[in-house]
Amino acid sequence: LILLCITGLGISYILYTDIAIVQLPVLIQKNPKITFVLGNASYRKSPSEQWEIAIVGQTLGLGYEVKTEKNSHMDIRFHGDMAIRVSENSMMRIDEMSVRKIMLKLNGGSMYGKFEKLFKDYDIKIKTPTAVAAIRGTELGFDVTEDVKEMKKLQLKQKKTEQKQGEKQEIEPLYMSTVYSLSGITELNNPAFEDQRVLLSYQNKILIKEKEPPSNPLKMTDDEITAMRSILNSIH
């Protein structure tokens, strides 16, 4: 017999058996909170809102954006086994958040985290301008930068075109994402090449450029492993 009990604290399910009374777990959505701030960091509820100074204890919700300035960072806790650090000169947005799914969008800069699923079907995804990471439960780092080499090629090509046509055009920035996996396995793809997916495993890294499919994974260097481990261990 299963009874549905409604109280001031929410809804719970109680299972009666011949042996004992067992209360089944109920999924509860907990909004993430800022747990540490160093330097100049801020948040806003949506792109139409004003930026506000980030403080420890601030609750974040769906659609919220956070950003950090130079020599600054922010730690955010989602639940007991999932926490991230938004490093300096970075911007991150919470695109989706429910009892079964979290999607974060790193628009620029770096982010490191311990990503742990609450249960088997819990869906965690991280997006950057060039990559989507479907996380199974692991320690990951993301670094989004402009592709300077490709930008220079475009600028030279654009300059020749302008000389012929006499019209000046703005060049959109090209980005690339480097993903570091300190543990576990993560599935990655470039949205522009949806059918070309790769698995990133223990102590490997991968580069994903804007107009190219993911490259082959490479081993992380000892310095990269040490630096990333230091960051993850210091997340509040």
Image (cartoon, rainbow, N blue to C red):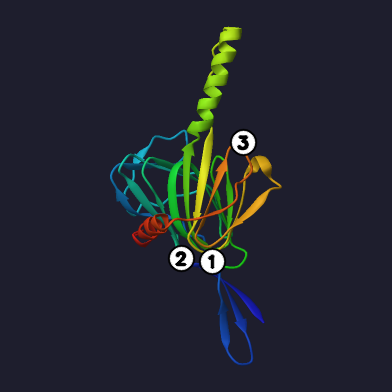
State the CA–CA distance, disc 1 to disc 3: 34 Å
Residue 171 visible within the image: no
State the image quarter where residue 98 is shown: bottom right
State the image quarter where residue 200 is shown: bottom right
Q: Residues within 10 Å of mark 3 (few under 14, many from 20)?
A: some
Q: Nearer the viewer, residue 93 or 152?
A: 152
**Residue 160 location, x and y as percent?**
57, 14
Residue holding disc 3: 211
Q: Residues within 10 Å of mark 1 (few under 14, many from 20)?
A: some
State the CA–CA distance, disc 1 to disc 2: 8 Å
Badge 2 element: loop
Q: Amino acid at mark 1?
A: Leu
Q: Amino acid at mark 3?
A: Lys
Specify the label residue 81 is tagged with: 2
Residue holding disc 1: 118
The residue at the point 61 percent across, 46 percent down is 214
**Residue 105 location, x and y as percent?**
52, 45
Label 1 close to label 2 by CB (< 8 Å): yes
Q: Quarter of the image for the N terminus: give it.
A: bottom right
Q: Earlier in the sequence, mark 1 or mark 2?
A: 2
Marks 1 and 3: which is nearer the front? Answer: 3
